[in-house]
Amino acid sequence: MAKRLFIKTYGCQMNVYDSARMADVLQPLGYVPADSPEGADMVILNTCHIREKAAEKVYSELGRLRPLKQDREARGDGRMVIAVGGCVAQAEGEEILARAPYVDLVFGPQTYHRLPEMVARAARARSAVLDVEFPVEAKFDHLPDNEAPQGASAFLSIQEGCDRFCTFCVVPYTRGAEYSRDAAAIAAEAQRLVAAGVREITLLGQNVNAWHGRGVGGGEWRLGRLIRHLAEIDGLARIRYTTSHPRDVDDGLIAAHGAVDKLMPYLHLPVQSGSDRILAAMNRQHGADDYRRTVDRLRAARPDIALSSDFIVGFPGETDADFAATLRLVSEVGFAGAYSFKFSARPGTPAAAMEDVVPERVKDERLETLQQLLGVQEAAFHRSKDGAALPVLFERRGRRPGQIVGRSPWMQAVIVEAPERLIGEIVDCRIVRIGAHSLHGEVTVADHDSPTQRVCA
Ligand code: SAH
Ligand code: SF4
Ligand code: F3S
């Protein structure tokens, strides 16, 4: 009989990808996806450790799951297996078991290919199973081919882990050392996705442009070469990649932005700060001017490229002058979107032990100032598309009947009144109105019955 599996995902896109693969791994055991934890036979929390708030969410969610598990067992409906995976599991597995002893299974991001075995062990043992190793075998070699994806856009993990050790960041500890998959395995996965109807692939890695894998036919490739190779896949219309480190943007990647039409003109390139002093304390290994130069070169290669970024305010030692340098960089570069965060001291990272802690009140003020500036830039970017004709990849139904929603080349949500059969297609649209969080458009080709005529790559 089918067993119900509910997975709740926190954190970055890598976790979204991993959650889908966990479902694939458990499918042969009879687990089918469920959309709520009520009545589920197994619940997995795929967790994120990046900031304190993210990590604390796990414990409050576990608190909500506990009565569900108890009720089910009291009714005699069998056990509800509660599993905690992802980066909190990796970082504080023992602590989870101590704080929430009703958890059955704790596993890290590098061991979920062993889930069937863990589930079997947990069923036999009355005590919890903990598997947070960094195993010698690569998880990717032990995962089944992924199941038919739902939708027009899919993630594909090509690189994992990180060797950069920014002083604020837990990722090198939770995900381990940098690892790049072979180009042939990546291309095969991309082919399968496209065969299942995917039109857009986002290549994923914690530091995706550090990817340096075995090329098809030998030799070592870097990301620009891989993108050119994937662009040859018929039916694949759009390629994106995230998240990049400015230091790993090399000539080949910049050239690919100029040469590969399928590579979308939108790049998330986190800079964190505009102050050289703070960038050095963060161990980012570049200065603010290096970032400016990289952006200039990207824009020279692909004039319509838009950038988004991540920022941290209130890093230890950040002065008013340092923060002013960040605002200056933002004003000069101009971002189409951004995420910004207050520095969160993470256990075990070098920055957590640094002096000159910035008071919470100052962090709040700086965050607000920065977000205001970034908000103005984002709104201006959206407005710049008013009246534009642009290709939209439709992904899903809209909230209102008759509406469908897609993405512009710059990741903007575009809402259009059009038939549902256009979902999965790339259609030329004209932007007629700019909303708060999305663009509104209309299909520019009158003939609704022959979508292929207006599909473009
Ligand atoms: N690999 C990516 C970042 C992954 S984490 C990169 O190198 O850019 C995503 C974002 O979370 C980071 O870019 C950073 O802005 C933020 N972040 C990471 N650790 C943080 C911390 N300790 N406090 C506040 N923000 C943090
Ligand atoms: Fe973290 Fe820095 Fe690695 Fe990004 S590059 S994952 S911020 S250590
Ligand atoms: Fe979070 Fe782990 Fe991703 S800490 S951001 S889920 S790599």
Image: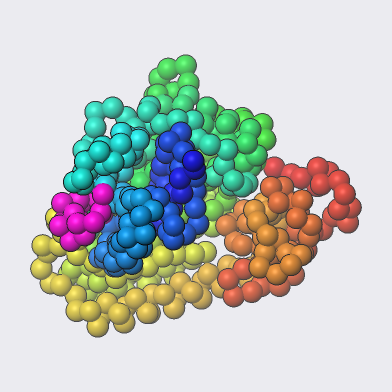
Q: Which residues are magenta?
A: 86-104
The answer to whether residue 246 is seen in the rendering is no
Magenta segment, prevailing SS (helix, strand or loop)? helix
Occupied quadrant, residue 257? top right
The answer to whether residue 318 is seen in the rendering is yes
Q: Residue at x 37, y 59 (%)?
A: 75
Q: Is residue 407 above or below residue 156?
A: below
Image coordinates for residue 24, horizontal then vertical, percent:
46, 38
Image coordinates for residue 189, horizontal then vertical, percent:
51, 31
Side of 155 where 151 appears, left or right: right
Image coordinates for residue 441, horizontal then vertical, percent:
73, 65
Q: Nearer the viewer, residue 388 or 163?
A: 163
Q: Residue at x 49, y 41 (%)?
A: 1
Q: Is residue 81 above or below residue 26?
A: below
Image coordinates for residue 430, horizontal then vertical, percent:
76, 62
Q: Quadrant of the C terminus?
A: top right
Indicate how the structure is coloured in the image.
rainbow
Q: Residue at x 63, y 71 (%)?
A: 383
Q: Is residue 3 above or below residue 333?
A: above
Side of 126 where 230 appears, left or right: right
